[in-house]
Image (cartoon, rainbow, N blue to C red):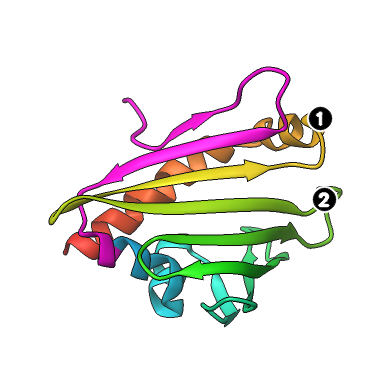
Amino acid sequence: MEQKTKVVAEEGKQEIRISRVFELPLESLFKAYVNPEIVEHWMGTKVIKLESKKHGSYHFETTDPQGNKHGFNGTIHEFEPNQKITRTFEMENTTFPVQLEFLEFQEINENNSKLEMLIVFKSISDRDNLLKLPFAFGLNRAHNKLEELLSS
């Protein structure tokens, strides 16, 4: 089955481009990224903090099947409702350095919207190491859950 979330990593670049068309209005898609309760449902993570504003920050925590807790945090640098979020992303207690993420939200029509993400890594090897994980599969699964949650 083809994944709806497209993940493109060009050879020799330290970035990943992600795009997905959702069968959701633009406002609903954007809300899924800034409302803590909705984020918890589709990401399957605990939201410790989510300040959806310029100079805001966030802190999420997830627990793996063995009971180990994993933290994720970052700073929001740009925040334009229903348009874009620019933020850093850091996986705590890992060897992965901080990433820079550019999220752009676009209205296609009143019932459909598009998310485009650009993730920039410190190095090509850092990007390639992330791609060795089931990153694309997990992101697609989370986006499917987001769409199902907000469609119902």
Label number found at residue 97? 2
Amino acid at dot 2: Pro
Residue 3, by quadrant, is top left
Element type at marker 1?
helix
Q: Nearer the viewer, residue 110 or 62?
A: 110
Label 2 Cα neighbours within 10 Å, binned few <14 / some 14-19 / many ≥20: some
Q: Residue furthest top?
A: 11
Whole-percent x and y of residue 9?
Answer: 60, 26
Name the quadrant of the N terminus: top left
Q: Is 10 one of the magenta-colored residues?
A: yes
Residue 60, by quadrant, is bottom right
Element type at marker 2?
loop
| Residue to which mark 1 is pinned | 125
Label 1 Cα neighbours within 10 Å, binned few <14 / some 14-19 / many ≥20: few
* Cα–Cα span, label 2 and label 1: 11 Å
Is 42 positioned to the left or the right of 88 in the image?
Answer: left
Whole-percent x and y of residue 71?
Answer: 71, 67
Q: Which residues are magenta?
A: 1-28
Amino acid at dot 1: Ser
Whole-percent x and y of residue 100?
Answer: 68, 52
